Image (tube, grey):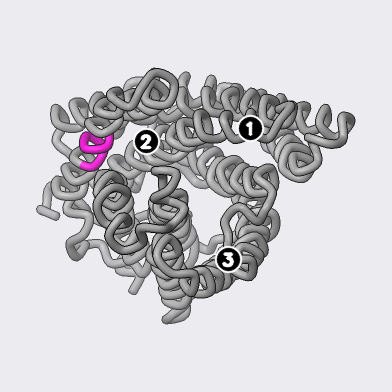
Amino acid sequence: MQRDDVRHAEAFLAKEKVSSGIEQPYFASAIGVVLTIGALWGVIILLRIALNGSFTSVDVQEVNAHGHAQIFGWVGLFVMGFAYRMLPALVGHPLPWKRAAQLGWLVMLIGLALRTSLQPFGSTHPTLFTLAQVGSALEIAAITVFSIQISWLLHKPTPDITRGAAWMLRAAIVFFAFQAIFSAVYFRLTAIATSRELLLWLISHFQPPLRDLQIHGFAMMMIFGISSILLPRWFGTRELPSRGSRIVAFVLVASVIAEVVGFLLMRLVGYRWAAIWGVASLALLGSSIWIVVKSRVLSLHPISSRSSKFIRAAHLWLLLSLGMLVLLPLWQFLVLPRLAPTSHAVEIGFSHAYYGSIRHAITVGFVSLMILGMSSRLMERTRPNDSLPPGTLTLPLVLVNLGCALRVFFQAATDIHPFAFQVAGISGILELTGIAVWAAWMLKSMCVEAKLDPLSPQTSLD
């Protein structure tokens, strides 16, 4: 950074407030979720799939319950805690209802536990189905309170939150709330489906748009909004141009909406509407490339931090995922017919394996690595320089990236050769181990009383 940029960053850091502690139960719960009903459950499911050599060998409600835990528990709780922690400091105003935010954690956790644990049994046990729906309602209530509070904060003028960042954050909040309602309705419809044909119809038509809202609409937009504010201050990346960030924010929101609408029209009306989906995919990729290039997030950062490697790796996975999304038609209609003409994916005209690889690259490769990187940076800044032993974050970085690489590439390869199931099956163990190592350090850091002002300017942490 230039000298003026450094002075601006130091002034920004100096005015940030000491942590209120409101984020800690959210962070701890998110870690608890990912180490149990999140990643651990996912590992078990993946191993069962590998042993049977089929992605359809596990009940869809069980798979979706695992996915729900990851989106609402791992990502959702971390985002809520991080936003409750950082945005009041950024705008210089306290939360309007701090007690509601604290209560919201408990409501969200209870709702998540009910919905996730009971969803696999909802189709056969009416009482459990009702309790699972109560869980969905509690999640919606907690997310509504969160959305109102964060929206109120974003209406407060501040020089540290650009209009582009504010638009991204507002859009992410809207997508967060909408996907929660969508998820509850979708779960109800799939649980009461009267035939397997109807169940498959619901899954093929509405599950991909739901995932687009959750991953591209909520998680990616929220990360872009927070990153455009904090990465220049925490890692020394370049600030995004004001006008360009507003345009990109508009393009991203329009692309997510077009992606969802285009897919629905393609499935419900005709495949000629796939062009809308294709243009939206290109726009998502192009906007992400612009953000990466303009921010110089892949270059060496003047502010040294062990956690910066997570940030760079995460953005590479983002570009890979969106690039694979754009190349989906090429894989489906050109590569697979030549390499595996008798495969089920060619027969039905859609590769679930390749589509799953795209999702995994962004959920684990981008979203999870950004969670690890940003939260680690926050924890680094709460402790003395010598409190983080060398290599503490290296093992999680290597294991998560290696596991993600094996999962992404070998899951797609299952369309070509059954041996790929075995390799993909062990990927989850590597990812879970990496997250567990990081979680042990993270939880220990959260329990240690800070000896420094948590967000005071510090020298190199390496």
Q: Quadrant of the C terminus?
A: bottom left
Q: Position of residue 313 (x, y in %)?
A: 32, 62
Between 265 and 392, the residue placed more toward the observer is: 265
Q: CA distance from mark 2 to mark 1?
A: 35 Å
Most frequent secondary structure within the magenta stretch: helix
Number of marks in picture: 3
Q: CA distance from mark 3 to mark 2?
A: 35 Å
Between 238 and 132, the residue placed more toward the observer is: 132
Pick whichever of labels 3 and 2 is earlier in the sequence: 3
Residue highlighted by disc 2: 221
Identify the residue shown where x is 38% and y is 30%: 169
Tell me, for residue 197, which label it has, or none: 1
Residue type at tag 1: Glu
Q: Position of residue 346 (x, y in %)?
A: 39, 50
Span highlighted in magenta in the image: 281-285
Q: Is residue 136 left or right of residue 23?
A: right
Identify the residue shown where x is 65% and y is 27%: 184
Q: Position of residue 173 (x, y in %)?
A: 46, 27
Pick whichever of labels 3 and 1 is earlier in the sequence: 3
Tell me if residue 284 is in the magenta stretch. yes
Quick check: marks 2 and 1 in contact, CB under 8 Å?
no
Q: CA distance from mark 3 to mark 1?
A: 23 Å
Q: Is residue 379 left or right of residue 240?
A: right
Q: Is residue 256 left or right of residue 82?
A: left
Mark 3 is surrounded, within 10 Å at the Cα level, by few (under 14), some (14 to 19) or many (20 or more) other residues, namely: some
Q: Quadrant of the N terminus?
A: bottom left
- Among the 4 quarters of the image, the one containing residue 272: top left
